[in-house]
Image: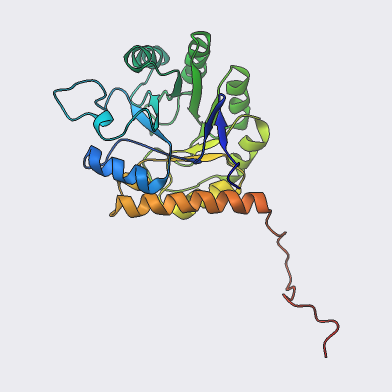
């Protein structure tokens, strides 16, 4: 089981859980949650997180980018041009080429898929490996794959809502439609929902608000760690087929 790695754009990760770096009370709590989660990748909103101003507390003082993969994202971008510019600046600042693209709309912060696809093509042409936040539309997810995405990241529910896995059928259809890693992103509220997504066959989970916004973020990070592991193992084990009638756990034949 130790060789069941998550591979994205040729990079290998031991954990299938990715956590965020926003909404924690401070970077120290964020670092403690990272340790509890077992994650080896964190998302970094380069427009909101201090990564290069030494006059203020810096994320890198608490989370070592040489030990944990930083995944710059374009949180807060509402146009493709803005997202592309943000990631180009991030690459200049930190040398990152594996990035997370999200282009939001004004409709409940849902992904703007037209702008997302347009900016993905520009970033791929510019040499980026792009993990793409998107709707749970399997047809559009295929278009993202064809355009060169490194991973597909459909939302479970609106960003930060905590509503959980609202449309498991579409998530399963996305997983069937693409060959890329499928990472469920946004809207989860608790660990059991992460396990449910992994049981569908998803390759990983991103959790930020569900952990950072919990009453005890460290304990919740620990819960997510084990939920992702349990869901993955349950998927690989293969669940029994549901039946509409009782089946005894012990055979009824051959009784004394």
Q: Is residue 211 left or right of residue 165?
A: left
Q: Is residue 163 left or right of residue 249?
A: left
- Furthest-right residue in this view: 254
Q: Is residue 249 left or right of residue 15?
A: right
- Furthest-left residue in this view: 55
How many labels were placed on the picture?
A: 0
Which of the 4 image quarters holds residue 174?
Answer: top right
Name the one closer to the observer, 162 or 126.
126
- Is 40 above or below relative to 33? above
- Is 79 above or below relative to 165? above
- Furthest-bottom residue in this view: 256
- Is 251 above or below relative to 87? below
Residue 107 x, y percent position in the rendering: 39, 30
Residue 142 x, y percent position in the rendering: 63, 25
Name the one closer to the observer, 161 or 232.
232
- Is 119 above or below relative to 173? above
User: How is the structure coloured here?
Assistant: rainbow
> What's the residue at 50%, 47% (across, down)?
165
Residue 192 x, y percent position in the rendering: 48, 55
Which of the 4 image quarters holds residue 26?
Answer: top left
Residue 44 x, y percent position in the rendering: 34, 29
Name the one closer to the observer, 112 or 72.
72
> What's the residue at 57%, 31% (across, down)?
7
Q: Quadrant of the C terminus?
A: bottom right
């Amino acid at each position: 089981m130790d060789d069941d790695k998550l591979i994205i754009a040729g990079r290998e990760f031991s954990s299938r859980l990715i956590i965020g770096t926003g909404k924690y009370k401070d970077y120290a709590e964020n670092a403690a949650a990272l340790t509890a989660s077992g994650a080896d990748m964190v998302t970094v909103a380069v427009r909101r997180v201090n990564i290069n101003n030494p006059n203020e507390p810096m994320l890198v003082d608490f989370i070592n980018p040489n030990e944990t993969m930083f995944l710059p994202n374009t949180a807060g971008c509402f146009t493709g041009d803005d997202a592309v510019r943000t990631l180009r600046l991030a690459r200049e600042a930190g040398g990152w080429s594996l990035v997370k693209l999200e282009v939001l709309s004004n409709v409940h912060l849902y992904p703007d898929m037209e702008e997302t696809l347009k900016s993905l093509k520009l970033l791929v042409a510019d040499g980026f490996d792009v993990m793409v936040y998107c709707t749970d539309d399997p047809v559009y997810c295929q278009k993202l794959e064809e355009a060169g995405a490194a991973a597909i990241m459909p939302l479970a529910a609106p960003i930060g809502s905590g509503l959980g896995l609202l449309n498991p059928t579409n998530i399963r259809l996305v997983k069937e439609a693409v060959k890329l890693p499928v990472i469920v992103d946004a809207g989860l509220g608790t660990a059991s929902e992460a396990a449910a997504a992994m049981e569908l066959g998803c390759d990983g989970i991103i959790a930020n608000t569900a952990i950072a916004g919990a009453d005890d973020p460290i304990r919740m990070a620990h819960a997510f760690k084990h939920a992702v592991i349990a869901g993955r193992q349950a998927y690989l084990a293969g669940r029994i087929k549901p039946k509409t009638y009782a089946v005894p756990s012990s055979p009824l034949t051959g009784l004394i």
